[in-house]
Image: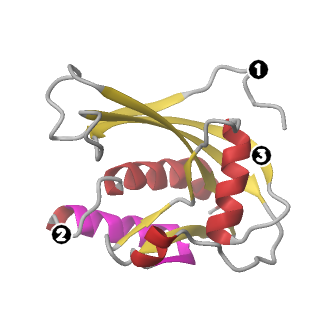
Amino acid sequence: MPELTHVKVKKLTIHYHEAITSLDGRIEERLAARGVILKDNKILLMYTRRYNDYSLPGGGVDPHESITEGLIRELKEETGAGNIKIEEELGIYEEYRPSRTLEHDILHMISYIYKVNCDDKFDLPQFENYELKNGMEVIWIDINEAIDHNKMVIEKMESSMGLSVKRELFLLETIRTKYIAKEQ
């Protein structure tokens, strides 16, 4: 599948985790792709019990994959979606956060966000072991409910709060502004 690189990709924002005070050190770069699947006023999201938050489906792009190949693979695995077609590239969300590996100090995550269409019928997700342990599930939810929920998690600074909830809140608000507000 050809990449959508004939146009300059819009950078949505760069987020620095509170623990990152300098970009000195060993930086690991990771590419990710995340999908926006909308139907009426609902959005298809992943709810993770461990972190008590909602996030866009998607994840890391493997070294042998293009970004769009990684997106399609991740969406099929996490949601069971089929016949995935990319409509448009929403943009890039960059973040710097503490690394979870001993080899690196900082993780520089670059997430490519795409609006996609897919079939109405979904197969069962094929979760990885850590996703099952974290209690991931696929859910159609009103985008406003998901935004309010993630805001509450951040405001309460829940002990279970994951590193990605601020990214997901930003992305959900961006999606609502670009796609949902127009439809209402």
Say whether disc 2 or disc 3 marks the residue closer to the N-terminus: 3
How far separated are the C-alphas under marks 3 and 1?
15 Å
Regarding residue 141, the answer to whether it shows in the image is yes
Using the image, tell me which numbered label, if any, was put on residue 158. Answer: 2
Say few, some or many: other residues with alpha carbon within 10 Å of mark 2 (under 14 / 14 to 19 / 20 or more): few
Residue 150 covered by magenta stretch: yes
Using the image, tell me which numbered label, if any, was put on residue 178. Answer: none
Say few, some or many: other residues with alpha carbon within 10 Å of mark 1 (under 14 / 14 to 19 / 20 or more): few
Q: Which residue is mark 3?
A: 87
The one nearer the camera, 43 or 70, is 70
Identify the residue at horizontal 33%, vertical 65% (top origin): 150
Q: Is residue 167 above or below residue 160?
A: above
How far separated are the C-alphas under marks 2 and 3?
36 Å
Query: Given the image, on which type of amino acid does mark 2 rest?
Result: Glu
Span colored in magenta? 136-154
Helix, strand or loop at mark 1? loop
